[in-house]
Image (spheres, helix red, strand yellow):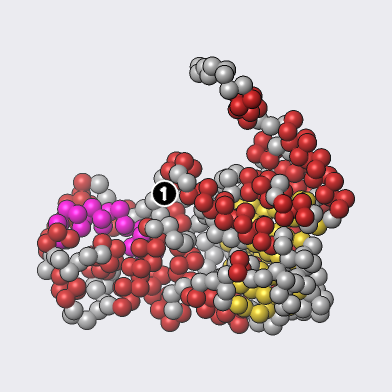
């Protein structure tokens, strides 16, 4: 029954918005992860229908021992759609089985009512945009070359062709040299290269931060990945550094830290020093870290840009996400991370990224960071476009940054047209000359404020003016 309890905890955390499906599943013990993943995903697919079945049966009201609806959901899934409840005859299992006949009856009634001819028609359909995003595979160049990887997949029956036109097609990405794109339905669960850490499943957009940070592959390099788990970006940084220098990977959550360690071991990251600590508690003047020159920041965010076969299973209220104070709280934390990174005395480059589509977490955070005392003390400004994947056409939103040049310096990715998940990447660099252009940005920004902001400021200057609405 412990297996079901652990899966129920994942559902509880999802309901409380305390992580993404992928992140929470990654925290499950490896020996149970495959089995738990299958149960969680399949239950989420049928969650809406099974919830109606449970409510109609009145089982939760009749059985006092059933205090967790998510636990009941998982057990009922296996009872009605699986191979039966895979647990000993304890009191909770018996409570479910006492209602087996009623649950089956309600199941069939609702199935007929919905006009479903098969059980599969009761499952929640996926986000259609996921079908337009290739299955990206990053070659771990610490273990082999991209050329070797291409030959490996050609020998396994794949062909160098458009992966959106052929189930066996794959191609080398135009922006990330060590990234390969396969058909969306391609499975790597049994692929020897994947199991051996020679390739890493990673969305294209999430490969941008490490490439933009571009830490030097030298023995005296000191780099920080501030929020490292599960380890995809960390292993990418390690590969770009050619396993030289020191890469400090911070993760404050104990379980996610364990996942990070396993990932780094599989990918053979020899220059990484994983640390189970909160980056915000690190003293920038500590002798161990004060010589850090490059910092990667990919802090917690709303995850609103993620479009894949897992996250669409969670019902979200987009309007609620936009209007409640959650984004404001996230943005405050994200800004704090950037400001802390700017305090490291030798840092030359800071990359800040999110998997969010909201300007509140993206352009607004960057704008606030540029206006902060830490940026002025650095001084820090945004790196020009030619240092931030210049060939990528989708850039920031000028109206959200009050400066067209700054918007051109940052990257946006959209699941609606870029064949990636939604993403945002910015890069801060230290330098006096750039600081002067940053001051100019502020002056230009005052003149380029959106009309609404100008009107608000105008009203503040004239407190006696009568407000009118149209």
Q: Quadrant of residue 139?
A: bottom right
Q: For this rendering, which residue is in front, 185 or 416? A: 416
SS at mark 1 in the image: loop
Q: The N terminus appears in which quarter of the rendering?
A: bottom left
The count of marks equals: 1
Report the residue marked by disc 1: 316
x and y, in percent, of residue 55 in the image: 19, 54
In the displayed structure image, the side of residue 430 where residue 454 appears, left or right: left
x and y, in percent, of residue 468 in the image: 52, 17
In the displayed structure image, the side of residue 20 where residue 58 appears, left or right: left
> Residue at position x 40%, y 54% from top?
314
x and y, in percent, of residue 22 in the image: 48, 65
> Residue at position x 64%, y 25% from top?
461
Can you see residue 410? no
Asked if 328 appears above or below 210 in the picture, the reply is above
- Residue 51 forms part of the magenta stretch: yes
> Residue at position x 14%, y 59% from top?
61
- Residue 79 forms part of the magenta stretch: no
Q: For this rendering, which residue is in front, 48 or 408? A: 408
Start and end of the magenta stretch? Answer: 41-59
Asked if 454 appears above or below 401 in the picture, the reply is above
In the displayed structure image, the side of residue 249 where residue 104 appears, left or right: left
| Dominant secondary structure, magenta | helix
In the displayed structure image, the side of residue 94 where residue 182 appears, left or right: right
Other residues around mark 1 within 10 Å, as few (<14) / some (14–19) / many (≥20): few
Q: Quadrant of residue 279?
A: bottom right
């Amino acid at each position: 029954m412990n297996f079901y309890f652990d899966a129920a905890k994942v559902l509880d955390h999802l309901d409380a918005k305390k992580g993404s499906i992928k992140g929470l599943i990654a925290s499950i013990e490896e020996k149970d992860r495959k089995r738990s993943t299958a149960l969680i995903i399949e239950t989420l697919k049928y969650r809406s229908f099974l919830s109606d079945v449970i409510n109609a049966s009145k089982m939760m009201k009749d059985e006092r021992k059933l205090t967790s609806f998510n636990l009941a959901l998982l057990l009922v899934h296996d009872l009605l759609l699986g191979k039966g409840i895979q647990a000993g005859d304890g009191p909770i299992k018996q409570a479910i089985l006492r209602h087996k006949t009623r649950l089956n009856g309600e199941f069939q009634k609702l199935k007929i009512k919905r006009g479903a001819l098969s059980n599969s028609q009761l499952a929640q359909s996926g986000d259609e945009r996921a079908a337009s995003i290739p299955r990206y595979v990053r070659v771990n160049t610490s273990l082999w070359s991209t050329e070797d990887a291409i030959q490996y997949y050609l020998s396994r029956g794949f062909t160098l062709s458009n992966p959106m036109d052929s189930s066996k097609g794959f191609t080398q990405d135009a922006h990330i040299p060590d990234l390969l794109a396969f058909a969306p339905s391609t499975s790597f669960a049994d692929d020897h290269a994947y199991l051996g850490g020679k390739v890493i499943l990673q969305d294209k957009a999430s490969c941008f931060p490490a490439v933009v940070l571009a830490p030097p592959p030298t023995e005296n390099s000191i780099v920080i990945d501030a929020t490292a788990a599960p380890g995809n970006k960390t292993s990418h940084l390690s590969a770009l550094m050619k396993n030289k220098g020191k890469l400090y990977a911070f993760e404050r959550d104990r379980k996610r830290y364990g996942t990070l360690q396993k990932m780094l071991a599989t990918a053979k990251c020899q220059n990484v020093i994983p640390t189970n600590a909160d980056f915000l508690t690190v003293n920038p003047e500590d002798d161990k870290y004060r010589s850090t020159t490059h910092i990667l920041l990919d802090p917690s965010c709303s995850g609103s840009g993620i479009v894949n076969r897992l996250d669409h299973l969670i019902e979200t209220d987009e309007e609620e996400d936009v209007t409640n104070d959650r984004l404001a709280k996230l943005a405050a934390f994200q800004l704090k991370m950037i400001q802390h990174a700017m305090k490291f005395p030798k840092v030359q480059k800071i990359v800040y990224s999110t998997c969010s589509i909201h300007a509140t977490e993206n352009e607004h955070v960057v704008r606030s960071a540029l206006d902060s005392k830490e940026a002025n003390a650095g001084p820090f400004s945004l790196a020009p476009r030619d240092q931030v994947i210049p060939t990528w056409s989708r850039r920031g939103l000028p109206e959200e940054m009050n400066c067209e040049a700054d918007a051109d310096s940052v990257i946006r990715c959209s699941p609606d047209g870029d064949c990636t998940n939604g993403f945002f990447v910015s890069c801060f660099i230290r330098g006096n000359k750039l600081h002067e252009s940053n001051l100019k940005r502020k002056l230009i920004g005052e003149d380029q404020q959106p009309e609404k902001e100008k009107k608000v400021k105008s009203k503040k200057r004239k407190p006696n003016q009568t407000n009118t609405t149209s």
